[in-house]
Amino acid sequence: MFDDSGANVFGLDIDESSLRQVASLRSARYFPVNCDLGVKSSIEEAFRQVADILARVHAEHPSVSDSVDILINNAGIVYNGTVEAHSADALERTFAINTVSHFYTVQAVLGEMKRKNSGHIVTIASAGGLVGTPGMSAYSASKFAAIGFEEALRGEIKASGKQIYTTLVAPYYINTGMFDGVRTRFSWLLPILDQQVVSRRIFNAIQKRKKRLIMPRFVYLVFPLRLLPVGLFDWLSDFFGITRSMNHFKGRPKG
Ligand SMILES: NC(=O)c1ccc[n+]([C@@H]2O[C@H](COP(=O)([O-])OP(=O)(O)OC[C@H]3O[C@@H](n4cnc5c(N)ncnc54)[C@H](O)[C@@H]3O)[C@@H](O)[C@H]2O)c1
């Protein structure tokens, strides 16, 4: 994370233990803020708290930024099951957290970034937002949507002429626990990624202001492969084990 540079780090999360976990990893100026990113009013309240804390810290240390310089939209949830099995609640929560929250968090910070003519917005999407994956249709659809959101935002920022950077991150499966049980057929091409390596690569991408980070590299092939006839593309998805990757999904234990 970013506190090595003396930055203020805010973690917005619904889960106290996740907030505490980050607190135990960080040394300097970490502020946990309880927030349900699936609920607009909760996001607004969280950003009010962020603004208050930043104003206080800035008053004590004027060299410290008084607004959000880097926004990372990272929270995400997944429900498994077929399209038919997804409940209304699962659909609404998935889209609210994985996609719609990005609008509200960006709305909370973009005005000030524009005023300062600086800032960076990071969208953590997924390779599941590049290839529709059976067994996680709502997740895939919400991540396709997050990628569309990011592309539109990038265009709007460019049109505004402001020096605000964006980074789209789309990783294949990572060993964080969110996708426990998933399987990959060719692990030398499509490995289950290591969370430490992924975070380091995201950090580097932000530092280098890379517009897009897709992991592993093999996933970049999805773009040219999309030019193939649909049947052939689907056959390749099957061959590489993507269509069956969720068959043994366990995810995080519930409760
Ligand atoms: N793990 C993977 O295989 C994988 C692959 C590609 C992309 N991603 C994406 O990376 C991001 C991080 O995932 P992760 O693997 O670290 O999963 P994770 O479950 O470890 O972390 C997700 C975090 O989001 C928080 N969260 C969930 N619902 C929330 C809500 N309503 N409000 C606030 N916070 C909420 C959780 O408490 C948790 O701390 C997600 O967007 C995920 O979709 C993960």
Image (cartoon, rainbow, N blue to C red):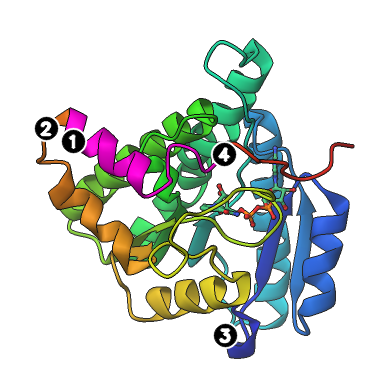
Q: Is mark 2 within 8 Å of ligand 1?
A: no
Q: Which residues are magenta?
A: 231-246
Q: Position of residue 189 (x, y in %)?
A: 38, 66
User: To which residue does mark 2 refer?
Assistant: 229
Pointer 4 or 2: first along the chain: 2
Q: CA distance from mark 1 to mark 4?
A: 21 Å
User: To which residue does mark 1 refer?
Assistant: 232
Front residue of 59/203: it is 203
User: To which residue does mark 3 refer?
Assistant: 63
Secondary structure at badge 3 equals loop
Q: Looking at the image, do the residues carrying marks 1 and 4 touch, with CB atoms under 8 Å apart?
A: no
| Residue 130 makes an appearance in the image | no
Q: Is residue 190 left or right of residue 81?
A: left
Q: Looking at the image, do the residues carrying marks 3 and 1 touch, with CB atoms under 8 Å apart?
A: no
Front residue of 186/78: it is 186
Residue shown at 85% from the left, 37% from the top: 254
Front residue of 40/133: it is 133
Q: CA distance from mark 4 to mark 2?
A: 24 Å
User: Looking at numbered disc 1 in the image, what kind of residue is underneath it?
Assistant: Leu
Give the number of the disc on residue 246.
4
Q: Is residue 182 left or right of residue 164?
A: right
Q: Position of residue 3 (x, y in %)?
A: 64, 82
Q: CA distance from mark 3 to mark 1?
A: 57 Å
| Residue 42 makes an appearance in the image | yes
Secondary structure at badge 1 equals helix
Q: Looking at the image, do the residues carrying marks 2 and 1 touch, with CB atoms under 8 Å apart?
A: yes
